[in-house]
């Protein structure tokens, strides 16, 4: 499956999920509105019956208009246009709510026109919880009526969301959320695997190219040496023998890099720490790198300002680490590579920086440059040789020593890698 196909599947799946979410939200809202309407109708019926019963109890004039006024979603004011007895009101409220099967906690209070306040506040819990008696000072006053009572439902949301229908919608929404999570994770894994597949394919192509060139050179050299006439020309003979040895060393080096990464990833590498002079190691590495490139002019300068340069480290791996950084700086530099190596001490640490004036790194490359098999594109697949293992190896060796590495880079300006080595661990 190609990357574009995966993206298309992910896009269609995302659109489908969004469509399902929209439909789910619509029906949940619809169900919520229905439950809200049902609650309002049930309360209105019950409170109208209470008002009618109080009027009848006081032998008053029957109410011609609906006495129930909804102030908010959970607060109602009931106009009875007659004196309200607290005990009578309590009795009729309980009776009315039982009749409509309303088992919600509520709080009611009676308006006192003499004091212009809501008085005799009572909290009623039909569900069997302990009743709490306290004045209903928080219920707002309405100036529209003279004789009325107010009723407040503190747990109105429980009635709406706790119903069976709403419970099903909430459950289905939770299931949908889980499905979305797994879908997103699956798409992430698929894209990641696709990317790894592409990286591994590029790695195999690069490895094939890297091996093919020296093998072809060795084959040609062997054909020349197999000709008896070459024995009569010692210069030609030894020249091709030298080429075979050089290309063989190159093959061995590439194989060792791959094996080193395999060992690092499997956790089998054990560091053999020994006391070593970092300046001496850097000088040896710089001398070898100056002579290692025939098609480039390599200028490596240094500024060694550090005075405390002895560290406990694995000499072989640290040498490879420095070689990789120098090699990387040279490969991504123009025909003349200008490299600067610096050292300095700061706060009981040794710092080593390797800076080049090469092509530099974009922000997207800076985030991935230490990833395994990742290679910075230079426009031509094979104009910069390698497997994309060098900096990944560097990162793993730095981590194994519990050091720290950072980079600063700008396109067209160059790249600087800085290694921080705590000295207190090496004393």
Image (tube, helix red, strand yellow):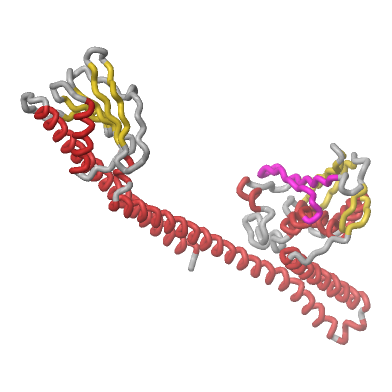
Q: Main secondary structure of the magenta part?
A: strand
- Give the residue at x 67% y 53%: 369
Give residue 26's position: percent from left, percent from top.
29, 48
Q: Is residue 135 above or below residue 425?
A: above
Q: Is residue 402 magenta?
A: yes
Q: Does 213 sit left or right of 347 as displayed?
A: left
- Give the residue at x 84% y 75%: 244
Give residue 341's position: percent from left, percent from top.
84, 45
Camera-nearest residue between 10 and 49: 49
Magenta part of the protein: which range? 400-422
The residue most toward the front is: 87
- Give the residue at x 23% y 30%: 76
Q: Does 335 sit left or right of 229 as displayed?
A: left
Q: Is residue 117 visible?
A: yes
Q: Quadrant of residue 256?
A: bottom right
Q: Is residue 325 above or below residue 64?
A: below
Give residue 327's position: percent from left, percent from top.
79, 56
Give residue 13's position: percent from left, percent from top.
40, 59
Q: Does 111 sit left or right of 343 as displayed?
A: left
Q: Is residue 207 magenta?
A: no
Camera-nearest residue between 148 and 174: 148
Camera-nearest residue between 129 and 392: 129
Q: Quadrant of residue 148?
A: top left
Q: Is residue 296 visible?
A: no
Q: How many marks?
A: 0
Q: Is residue 390 above or below residue 363?
A: below
The residue most toward the top is: 114
């Amino acid at each position: 499956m190609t990357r574009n196909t995966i993206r298309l599947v992910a896009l269609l799946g995302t659109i489908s999920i969004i469509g399902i979410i929209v439909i789910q939200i619509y029906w949940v809202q619809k169900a919520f509105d229905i439950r809200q309407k049902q609650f309002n109708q049930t309360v209105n019926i019950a409170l109208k019956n209470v008002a009618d019963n109080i009027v009848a109890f006081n032998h008053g004039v029957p109410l011609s208009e609906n006495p129930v006024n909804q102030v908010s979603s959970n607060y109602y004011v009931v106009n009875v246009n007659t004196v309200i007895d607290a005990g009578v009101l309590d009795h009729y409220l309980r009776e009315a709510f039982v009749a409509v099967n309303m088992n919600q906690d509520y709080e009611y209070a009676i308006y006192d026109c003499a004091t212009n306040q809501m008085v005799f506040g009572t909290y009623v819990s039909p569900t069997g919880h302990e009743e709490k008696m306290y004045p209903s000072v928080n219920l707002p006053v309405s100036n529209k009526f003279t004789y009325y009572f107010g009723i407040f439902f503190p747990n109105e949301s429980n009635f709406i969301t706790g119903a069976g229908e709403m419970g099903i919608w909430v459950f289905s929404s939770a299931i949908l959320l889980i499905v979305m999570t797994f879908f997103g994770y699956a798409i992430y894994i698929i894209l990641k695997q696709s990317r790894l597949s592409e990286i591994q394919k590029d790695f195999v192509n690069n490895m094939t190219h890297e091996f093919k060139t020296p093998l072809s050179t060795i084959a040609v050299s062997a054909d020349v040496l197999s000709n008896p006439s070459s024995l009569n020309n010692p210069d030609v003979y030894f020249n091709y023998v030298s080429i075979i040895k050089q290309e063989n060393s190159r093959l061995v080096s590439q194989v060792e890099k791959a094996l080193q990464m395999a060992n690092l990833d499997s956790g089998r590498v054990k560091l053999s720490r020994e006391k070593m002079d970092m300046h001496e190691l850097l000088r040896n590495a710089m001398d070898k790198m100056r002579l290692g490139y025939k098609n480039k002019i390599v200028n490596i300068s240094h500024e060694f300002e550090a005075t405390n340069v002895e560290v406990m480290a694995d000499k072989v791996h640290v040498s490879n680490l420095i070689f990789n950084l120098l090699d990387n700086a040279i490969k991504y530099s123009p025909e003349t590579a200008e490299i600067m190596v610096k050292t300095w001490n700061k706060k009981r640490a040794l710092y080593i920086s390797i800076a080049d004036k090469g092509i530099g790194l974009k922000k997207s490359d800076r985030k991935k440059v230490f990833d395994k098999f990742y290679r910075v594109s230079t426009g031509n697949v094979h104009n910069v040789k390698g497997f994309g293992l060098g900096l990944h190896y560097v990162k793993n060796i730095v981590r194994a020593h519990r050091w720290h590495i950072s980079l600063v880079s700008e396109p067209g300006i160059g790249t600087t890698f800085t290694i921080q080595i705590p000295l207190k661990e090496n004393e």
